Image: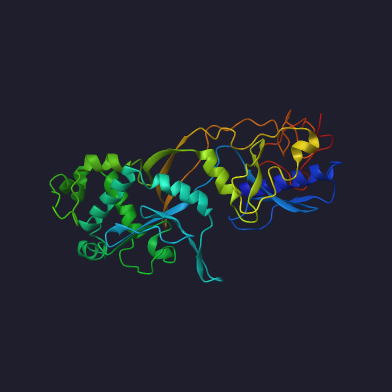
Amino acid sequence: MDDSTKHEHFVAACISWSMDHSSLFGDKWKATRPQVDTKHADVRIDGPGGGVWVEVKMGKNDFLMNPRLGYQERNGKPIPNDRPNFPVFNGWYVSYDWNKEKNKLENSNSTIACAELLKQVSDDPNLKKWIKNFKGWLQNGGNASRKKSREYWQKHMSAYFHMSSLGGYQRQANRLDKSSKGMVNTEDMKKFVKDLTEDPKQNRWRKNLTTQKVSSSGKVTFGHVYEEMKVLSGVKSYASQNLCEVSINVPHLIATHYAHKADGGAYYMQAGHDFYVMPMMKRPSSKGEDPLHLNKKFNIKIPLFWSNAGSKTPISMRLSNRSGFHEFMTEIKMNNWVHSDYSAIPCVDKINPFNGKVWNYTVNPGSGNVSKPIKTNPFK
């Protein structure tokens, strides 16, 4: 069990203890950390009238959303956005998982939030230039040491081109078309990044770039010199590079993402030592804001997660090369968190939102004891 999962169990144990020791809830209420997929939030609170979910983050530097992405072209053009449950923008889409039992593709991320993200990220001009550069590298024999030659890419890329997270051939279900021709392999991707990071004097392909000319057909040529290509590609290291950066309304995006998770979405969030109420965001099925009526029961005012929703935060799309695969991902964090005076786990001077009492000690995320989550006499 990893640290974040252990912490989720600890948060559930703290909430259960607090509700059990509250005259307004009692032992009919219980919080658990169920074994569910990423379509659900982390902790479920059950009691009379049903259950609600709580999203849990160990700290405010955790990723709030990091979907893996793929890119496809057909006949030299980005694939269209023609599938209702699988948003596609400028050829980019969220990578999907193949459900063997249901025999179909499934998206583990909120399609509404991902559509909003894709729409903004995929239109970035630097990202479009990066794709053009990578295609040119393939078509001009950048990966000539592999079995797939320049002639292969010149033949197949005009009809079909596909970059997928998790490594192309290793995850052939992870695409919207059945053809495997024109699919980029992890070795291709790693060699491309390596060519960018090597010394130009030691790299045959890069030296030739400065003398290549752009073909009038624009089909199978690459005319950018290395210096321009390095700037456009945003190379940072062999293992990782940022492809583009855009500023988006992260609080609104994340609120949408968690509101549309499975089983009604998350109605609350515990992030580090701060507790929040999640906004409504036109949920498919809604129990209303603050469905446990914590604010009314204890005469408190828990802040909304997106109280700073007007602010925009720079986020990057990144190519990450791992040992056996590669990933295209957007790693989304939030800079401007609103302060909360409430915490479901012990934090000195903060108010427990499940009984309205003030904690007299602190337990740091990751160090809690699930079997005995709360000490004797925990409140001021």
Left or right placement of residue 43 versus residue 138 in this view: right
Relative side of 360 to 106, left or right: right
Quadrant including the C terminus: top right
Residue 300 shows in the view: yes
Question: In which quadrant of the rendered view does residue 293 lie?
Answer: top right
Q: Residue furthest right?
A: 23
Residue 352, by quadrant, is top right
Q: Position of residue 38 (x, y in %)?
A: 58, 55
Q: Nearer the viewer, residue 10 or 281?
A: 281
Q: Residue at x 13, y 52 (%)?
A: 216
Between 88 and 162, the residue placed more toward the observer is: 88
The figure's colour scheme reads: rainbow
- Give above or below for 260 relative to 310: below
- Give the percent coordinates (x, y) of residue 155: 22, 65
Which residue is depicted at the point 84% across and 41% down? Answer: 22
Relative image position of residue 327 (x, y in whole percent)? 42, 53
